[in-house]
Each structure stands twice: as structure tokens, then as C-alpha cells.
Image: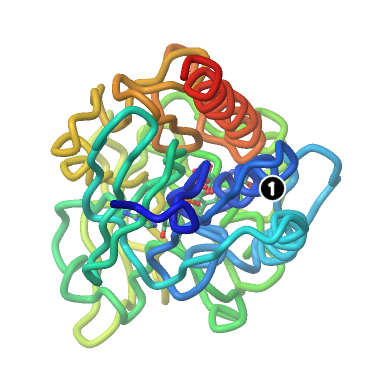
Amino acid sequence: MVLQGDLYDITVVGAGPVGLYAAYYSGLRECKTKIIEMYPHVGGRLISMYPEKEIFDVAGYQRIVAAELIAELTGQAMQYDPVVVLDERVSGLRVLDERLIELTTHTGASHYTQAVVLTVGAGTALPRKLDVPNLISLEGNGIHYFLPAFEPLRGRKVLVVGGGNSAVDWAMALENVAAEVTLLNRSYTWTAHEAMVEKLLSSRVKVRYPYYGLKAVLGDDRVTGAVIWNEKSGLEETIAVDDIVLSIGMLANIEPFRQWGLDIVGDGIRVNTDMSTNLPGIFAAGDIVTYHGKIQLIASGAGEAATAIHSAKEFILEGVLGR
Ligand SMILES: Cc1cc2nc3c(=O)[nH]c(=O)nc-3n(C[C@H](O)[C@H](O)[C@H](O)COP(=O)(O)OP(=O)(O)OC[C@H]3O[C@@H](n4cnc5c(N)ncnc54)[C@H](O)[C@@H]3O)c2cc1C
């Protein structure tokens, strides 16, 4: 039997930016809220991957450093005193009864709740890699997938690979830190925001595009250069670089969510417009969800979080009124 005191209205799984905002909104709606995060800190990718990077596209801030945004979101979330459980990875989810869901974690603990909002982001995703000589063997010695600090790259020659927002952002962030920045985009188009691409093209960054890819990494103990090539013409050239930042996406580990019985489409949990999943009482928001038109941004994730909490509250009320 679950004691009333142990039963939460809404449990938010994952304390990235979207989970923090969900916890705030849940408190605002006077729901008894718990948030469970697998790392010893909150903040999601903004803290683990890019704490020093500036963000330009969240509502209300012309620019804000990622770690500062997380401090703001944390302060906002804590106003309603949610219970915060850190260092616990949710490994099991079972709908026991109507409005009674059990979440189990890798420590063996159980958490009981009427509704769940999954904001697990990329979850235990790993960065996408390239099958090119020397890349894997030089990881940690000049090969980077994200940059927790910019200062170690001061005065160095850096090659950034990718054509999306994060690649363009990294290149721009390093423009005045590194001695030289080159960016390779193998595609004909950019997936980065248009205005940021404009800024990039008029910056000091040497942009090689379209069709430019990485062919090989050079160096014995650490990176000393790269062979780059034009995939259309086949022409290759060798450039001297000290560091290579690969920013070509993440490979989500979606398997656990499938095992919980959630409907998975591609790399995401399929949600309806009210952010409900196929399981009763389970809602989701942020990077982990998929629907027609989904974009993976903090701003859109926050909107989804508000919708998910609203729907979760409605779900709980339906149970109360129906009894
Ligand atoms: C390099 C880079 C730069 C970016 N720049 C921008 C930008 O400028 N603007 C913008 O809007 N977006 C940007 N993004 C995208 C943005 O980071 C994501 O959209 C955002 O982090 C999604 O938030 P989230 O809370 O859904 O997921 P995450 O930030 O991934 O947070 C998910 C949290 O859930 C936790 N978790 C996962 N599984 C479990 C589990 N089983 N149990 C408990 N906890 C779990 C994780 O540890 C993590 O803390 C960038 C992304 C990258 C990679």
C-alpha cells in the first residue's frame, strides 16, 4: 500500500531546462511535485555540454550564458518547493492502477505518483561520431564532442564540423578565443538559424561549404591536423589544427522508453497535441518528444512543459471528479 504522504501529484523525470520549467509550472498549478534527475546536478545539457555558451533564442533574454539560464530556471522552479531527487536514474515505469504510477530508479528506490511528465531530453544519448581514421583513438586528445569550457582552446587552431545550430554557435563562440577557427559543412544547406549563419559568414571563421567533410584526423598522441575533402569534386587538402569539435548530432538511447510500453517514433516518444503519450497518466515534453513540426529548442520545450503539466493536472482532476 502506498502511504498518502509518499504519493505525489506530478513527478517530473529529468531536470534539464524543460524539466525545471515543468516543475515550476506544476507548483504554480498547486500540484505536489517531485523532480528526479540522474546526475548529481540539475541543468541537463546546458550544464553538461555548454555551460559557458551564450543562448540568444529564449524568450525574454537578448543573450544569456547557459549556466545563468539554468540558475534562473532553478530559482523559478524552487519557489514552490518541489522535492528534488538527484543522482537517481529512473529505470522502470509501471502504471499500477488508475492514477497510481510507480517509478523505480537504479538505486532500487520506488517513487509513487498520480501522473508523470517525462523531460528526459536526449536521455543517455551519445554524440554521433564519424568513421574516419584516428578519430576515436584521439578522443580526449584534441577531439571534442562538446565544450564545457572555452579557455583551454585559447590561442589554438580549431576545426568545427557540422552545419547545425550547435556547430555554428561553437564556431562563433570560439571566434575571439581561438587563434583560428575553420568550420566544415558537408551539406548544401544549413540547419542553423539563418541570422546566425549570416553572422558566421561575415565573421573571422573560415567557412568551408558546401560538400566539405572530414576525411582523416592526423596526429600520434594528439591532434596535429586534419585531412578535409570536397565530397563533390573529391579534392583533398591537409590543414594544421590543434583541436577538432564534432557537432553532428546525438544518438538517442530510446530503448528503455520502448520497454516501458511507450510509443516510439524515430528517436522520440510520440505525443499528442496535449503532450499525452499512449500510456495513461504519462506525459512528455522537450527534446525527447516527437510530433509533426517538432523543433528541439529550449523555448519550444518550455511551451510543451506548460501544456504537459496542464494536461497532467486535468488527468488528475478527472480521477477526483470521477470517484
Ligand atoms: C551544443 C548545443 C548547443 C545548443 N544551443 C541551444 C541554443 O542556443 N538554444 C536552444 O534553444 N537550444 C539549444 N540547444 C538545444 C537544447 O540544449 C535542448 O533543446 C534542451 O537541452 C532540451 O532540454 P530538455 O530538458 O528536454 O533535455 P536535456 O537538456 O537533455 O535534459 C534532460 C535531463 O534529463 C535527465 N535524464 C535523462 N534520462 C533520465 C532518467 N532516466 N532518469 C532521470 N533523469 C534523466 C538528464 O540527465 C538531463 O539532465 C543546444 C544543444 C546543443 C547540443
Q: Quadrant of residue 176?
A: bottom right
In the image, is residue 285 above or below residue 38? above
Nearer to me, 304 or 199: 304
Q: Residue furthest bottom?
A: 221
Q: How many marks?
A: 1
> 150 left or right of 103?
right
Identify the coloring: rainbow
Q: Quadrant of residue 54?
A: bottom right
> 190 left or right of 39?
right
Nearer to me, 167 or 34: 34
Q: Dot 1 surroundings within 10 Å: few (below 14), some, or many (20 or more)?
A: many
Decide if residue 266 is in sight here: yes
In the image, is residue 18 above or below residue 129? above
Which element is circle 1 on? helix
Whether disc 1's CB lies below 8 Å from ligand 1 is answered: no
Residue at 45% in and 70% down: 86
Nearer to me, 172 or 85: 85
Residue at 19% in and 38% down: 260
Q: Quadrant of residue 195?
A: top right
Residue at 47% in and 22% down: 319
Residue at 37% in and 47% down: 122
Q: Position of residue 155 (x, y in %)?
A: 60, 81
Decide if residue 201 is in sight here: no
> 153 left or right of 284?
right
In the image, is residue 129 above or below residue 143? above
Q: Position of residue 269 (x, y in %)?
A: 32, 29
Nearer to me, 203 or 234: 203
Looking at the picture, which amino acid does disc 1 mark? Tyr
**Dot 1 corresponds to which residue?**
24
Q: Position of residue 128 (x, y in %)?
A: 27, 50
Q: Position of residue 160 (x, y in %)?
A: 46, 56
